[in-house]
Amino acid sequence: MIAMAIFGIAAQFGSADITWLISAFYIATAVAAPTAGRLGGLFGARCVYLSGLVLVAIGATIGTVAPNMGWLVAAYCFVGIGTAAQFPNAMTMIRDYAERYGKQPRTAITTLAVCAQTFAALGPTLGGLLVGAFGWQSIMWINLPLVAISAAMVGRLGDIGVRLQHVPGGRELMQSLDLAGVALFLVLITGTMLFLQSLQAEPAWWLLLVAACALPLFVERERRAKVPFIDVHSLARNRALSATLGRTVFTWTAFYCVYFGIPQWLQYARGMDAVDAGLTMLPVAGVGICTTLIASRMYRRFGPRLPLALGSATLLIGGVLLAAVEDSTAPIYVVLLVAGVLGVPNGFNNIGNQNLINAVTSVSEIGTAMGMLRTAQFVGASLSAVVLRITAGPVIQDDGIDRVGLCIAAAGALLLIGVLLSRNMGVPRRPSRGDSTASTSPA
């Protein structure tokens, strides 16, 4: 929804820090997601899930009354951390339910993926309607009733998601959260993003040096940590997991270039208001929902390679179309057609990657693995803000959207090559409960 609010926020607070409004939210989510999955294992998935809802409510309240950009960025950090708590712990609760009652979690995972895909794709449309009717603040306060509904529904799950592991003391808890690893990760990703943003004017090479130094320090720290923030040993052993996370970064960088780039172009270059721009994005949502359902059946029958290949190929085609035909004078039906094509990859890529993560991890690891998946997604989202800033600048006009389309096409091409050449596309046997070794062998 923030994609539709950027125009109004920039009009009120200025456009200088808009990139960091987006990036701060996704960096906070990327950092918090693995930690949230680990905390769910320690204190119970449902407890951490509900705690995340509280943080979302706090952030939404602050954001609704934010007097300046600084307060709004802080509000989005709260929302990002709270949001990060939900997905990995939802996956843990689903797997917990499946293991207890002898169910296959695939159907529930597909349902979760469809819901996530539906509302992510509907975000620009819903955001446009809200912003048009109530102003940009509405994308913040709308979270409050959603928090209340979610809390009521999760509260009815009985004892699902409340099983606890050993609860550590204060010092042991700090070690299990790996604060040093989190700090180095922050330095790495923030330094990288600042350097990439500086390429638009004069490159700040010292930032590249900071990031380059942070990378080996981060890897070494995670290798030695008892409970690492990012389990580099698992990534090294489980090639299917690491390959999926890498694909996810590229996939979501391209997705968020669509979600953030096209709405801004519609408002800046074509002069649409928020409502019209949101409705123009509706084909992305509708087609994405349909392809999610198709991809789920395709995955069950053919495995992950075919849906991932189709998703990557259509991402390449959609990017080329965006670069070739989109300008401020293009007929609206052409814009809608391109939006529809760009909605196709969402379902195929998300279903393929998400189910593959579930297939190559055990029930004891799924929360942390899904946390890493969310980290990869939101690192991609953060990078999309940088890509848009470098290619299109703070105001996206026709030449800028052409360059954005070429970047999306390049990401699709790289993903397609990777999928076709990968040997880690088979789905291994489903590990038994607590089987931590089965997931470490490459698929």
Image (cartoon, rainbow, N blue to C red):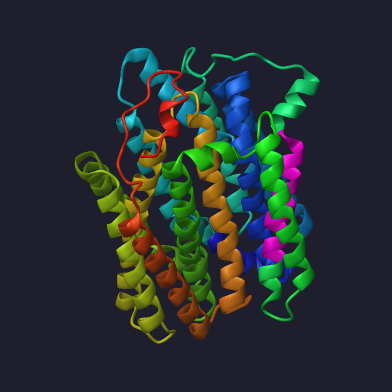
The foreground one among 379 and 275 is: 379
Identity of the residue drawn at 33% across and 51% down: 347
Q: Is residue 68 visible?
A: no
Q: Position of residue 262 (x, y in %)?
A: 47, 70
Q: Position of residue 355 (x, y in %)?
A: 36, 39
Q: Position of residue 334 (x, y in %)?
A: 31, 77
Q: Up-down: is 403 above or below 308?
A: below
User: Does residue 405 appear to the left or right of 110 in the view shown?
Assistant: right
User: Does residue 270 appear to the left or right of 136 in the view shown?
Assistant: left
Identity of the residue drawn at 49% across and 23% down: 364
Identity of the residue drawn at 41% across and 18% down: 433
User: Does residue 206 appear to the left or right of 315 in the view shown?
Assistant: right
Q: How many marks?
A: 0
Q: Is residue 396 visible?
A: yes
What is the quadrant of the C terminus in the image? top left
Identity of the residue drawn at 64% across and 34% down: 35
Q: Quadrant of residue 163?
A: top right
State the extent of the magenta-drawn residues as a range.
Answer: 178-194
| Residue most extreme to the left | 301
**Magenta-drawn stretch contains 202:** no
**Magenta-drawn stretch contains 180:** yes
Q: Up-down: is 75 above or below 161?
A: below
Q: Position of residue 133 (x, y in %)?
A: 53, 58
Q: Up-down: is 79 above or below 367?
A: below
The foreground one among 88 and 283 is: 88
Q: What's the magenta bit mostly, secondary-structure-wise?
A: helix
